[in-house]
Amino acid sequence: QVHMVESGGGLVQAGGSLRLSCAASGRASSSSVMGWFRQAPGKEREFVAAIDWTGGTTDYADSVKGRFTISRDNAKNTVYLQMSSLKPQDTAVYYCAARRSGGVLRIGTGYDYWGQGTQVTVGS
């Protein structure tokens, strides 16, 4: 059984910060790569950030580079997304994803497990 549960979403004003968490259990808990994706209304899902098992390799979408930081705590089977300097265009449902094997990847179809999503709304 696989569970991935996101938390930490909410409403924040532009320029503010939020930290998302995603706790993995079951087969997802030992995934080599964890990632965050987001989907805004009327738009396709897009890659946000990803991190490998050691935390030594990370990747970010250009739109969030320098503002978002991905990290993971393997002892807690949890991946985090620290979001700062938030903009209204960051408003979306944010999903965490896990990849059983392989390296950091920007393509969503390469991930094996997904959370249910958490809403982030940034007011102007």
Image (cartoon, rainbow, N blue to C red):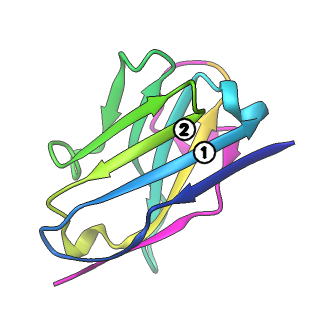
Residue beneath the point at 17% across and 49% down: 67
Query: Looking at the image, which is closer to me, 9 or 66?
Result: 9
Of the 4 image quadrants, the one containing the N terminus is top right
Query: Looking at the image, which is closer to me, 65 or 3?
Result: 3
Q: Is residue 28 above or below residue 103?
A: below
* Total residue callouts: 2
Task: Verify CB contact (< 8 Å) between mark 2 and mark 1.
Answer: yes
- Residue 93 falls inside the magenta stretch: no
At mark 2, the secondary structure is strand
Q: Position of residue 23 (x, y in %)?
A: 60, 45
Residue beneath the point at 61% across and 37% down: 98
Q: Position of residue 104 (x, y in %)?
A: 46, 26
Q: Residues within 10 Å of mark 2 (few under 14, many from 20)?
A: some
Q: Which residue is mark 2?
A: 78
The answer to which quarter of the image holds residue 54 is: top left
Residue beneath the point at 16% across and 84% down: 124
Q: Position of residue 90 (x, y in %)?
A: 29, 67
Q: Residue furthest right?
A: 1
Q: Residue furthest front?
A: 75
Q: Is residue 27 left or right of residue 91?
A: right
Q: Is residue 39 left or right of residue 109?
A: left
Q: Is residue 83 above or below residue 88?
A: above
Query: Looking at the image, which is closer to me, 77 or 58?
Result: 77
- Residue 123 falls inside the magenta stretch: yes
The amino acid at mark 2 is Thr
Q: Which residue is mark 1?
A: 23
Q: Is residue 89 left or right of residue 25?
A: left
At mark 1, the secondary structure is strand
Range of residues picked out in magenta: 102-124
Query: Looking at the image, which is closer to me, 32 or 104?
Result: 32
